[in-house]
Amino acid sequence: MSQQRLINSKRFLPFFLTQASGAFNDNVFKNALMLILAFTAANALPWDTDLTMNLAAGLFILPFLLFSATAGTLADAVCKTKLIRALKLLEIGLMLLAGLAFYFQQYLLLLGLLFLMGSQSAFFGPVKYAILPQLLTDKELLAGNAWVEMGTFVAILLGTITGGLLVGLADAPLWIAGVVVLFSVLGYLISRHIPAVGEVHNADNFRFAPWQQTKATISISYANRTLYLAIMAISWFWFLGASYLTQFPNFTKTVLGGDNTVVTALLVAFSVGVGIGSMLCERLSGDRVELGIVPIGSVGLTVFGVSLFFSSPAALPAELLNLPQFLATAFGWWVLTDLTLIGVFGGLFIVPLYALLQQRAEPQQRARVIAANNIFNALFMVVSAIAGIVFLTVLDLAIPEYFLILAIMNAVVALYVYSQVPEFALRFVIYLLSHTTYRVRSNGLEHIPADGAAVLVANHVSYVDALLIAGAVRRPVRFVMEKAIYDLPVANWLFKAARTIPICSKQKNEQVYEAAFASIKRELEAGNLVCIFPEGRLTKSGEIDSFRPGIERILAETPVPVVPMALQGLWGSFFSHHGNGAFKFKGRFWSKVQLIASPSVPPQHASAAELEQQVRLLRGDSA
């Protein structure tokens, strides 16, 4: 489904508008309150303004640390649609109280309500992401996350700007009260149209025990190392985002020499960039959760973070510049472009990671995985404030130098995550191969079962057959590969990351041969896809060699469906044996490749000879 069709669907649009209106309302309330406390009511509280600002920021983020685990447990235990509507009703009540508090200038009450709004947001966060896999299909999940991230950042931006504008109006308290109550009511009415998704089967019963639930939720996140490191990567992005956004006012005033209009422009550039990057994810990934674009995002974050350091001017202007004057300078557009692209690559980085959490978490634990993510997000944002104090105050670095350190730290964090979870690097290589050197098109892949075990059989044309098939097939595939190819330098690291099964002839090494069949049996019994190249070696002529009877032993030990496949267009490419051997330029570095699959064959009819004939028919006249 295209992005346009998804946003117009009755399954998704009410949810999208509900969560976007909530983010908008939160930021209207929070920014209006912060500005009133900083300027209009600076002397209304019995302490100084700096303490008020830090107290307000802490009161909003504290509930994410206290209640995220409880919120995740609750969202896993009940119907998520009903929970969203209940939370929107709670928002109406809080906003009615806030409207009265604004009107009667009850600032201590407003600080208390800020804590309660943070609590409502903390309970909304896990259900917001956990409901998506129940509303959408796997093919729609990445697009759904892209819309949510784009909508959230745009809503935050519009809410922040609206809150600032309302404070400047005559009768500001009335205007603020009217807007926050109106949007809370609209949010609830829209939430009434979110489809009912029902409760998740085998979900745990809910009880209120925040401390125990926090420990249990964090333990759940530790249980799956891929999900845990994805959470760490998402939290790192929020560390970066908070670090940039916190420094925008001082960066604008003390480095760029700009006024408040320039601060707003920087905020707009960053937020719009994240929205653009989020929406680009589906176009770059197709309709699948493509982890290969996560490394692209991390590279962009580092490159344009470094560029932001070099784009900062060496000397301040004589007086503060408004936005038109700022854009007329030599550095104005450079700075805005850097911040926009940091946002774009941030969107590319974060959207597939959120989709990964939703897709791979157990359904009965999905909201708690999201809750664990929210807990770590909040912790990382607190640490970002501490890091800003250490680098800018204790070490007395300039803000551009701090931005440079952030960019370098991002590269180090990315390398660590990708070394611990090689799947990211593997998908990155597959993505580059299938979108640059090879243009892969597929036909008939719907014949591959969406769930359960199956054996895929294909002709063996080049050294990158496995990578190209892995890039086209939606499900993870375990490949059985000739040990000589498996042991190739560099490629061996990728094959290990893909849990490839090495094999050789029984005469050459009986131990490796038998271990391969044992591994195949384990993978099939676990319900996975296994792909074999029954020819046993790369073709030297472009023609299909006779299939070996090993496929018959596999099916005798574990009877599962077999899906015949054929690769077309690879013969004569850079990694094939055409001409003078592999890895030599043959005039066809850019190759159009077709991967074709036919309907599955029952195991009792899947002899080596019959499968060889089917693959020959699929291949047609060209390899």
Image: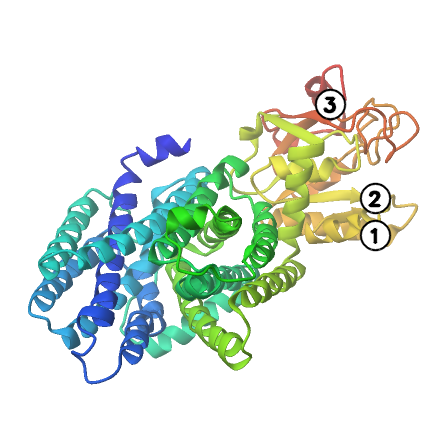
Q: Which element carries disc 3, helix, strand or loop?
A: loop
288, 323: nearer the viewer: 323
Q: Which element carries disc 1, helix, strand or loop?
A: helix
Q: Position of residue 491 (x, y in %)?
A: 78, 48
Separation of marks 1 and 2 at Cα, in angstroms: 14 Å
Circles 1 and 3, Cβ within 8 Å, touching? The answer is no
Q: Position of residue 269 (x, y in %)?
A: 42, 49
**Residue on which disc 3 sits:** 569
- Residue pictured at 18% horizontal, 55% vertical: 166
Q: Position of residue 397 (x, y in %)?
A: 55, 73
**Residue on which disc 2 sits:** 485
**Residue on which disc 1 sits:** 512
- Residue pictured at 79% horizontal, 25% vertical: 588
* Whether residue 498 is visible: yes
Indicate the amino acid at tag 1. Answer: Val
Left/right placement of residue 80 relative to residue 217 reads left
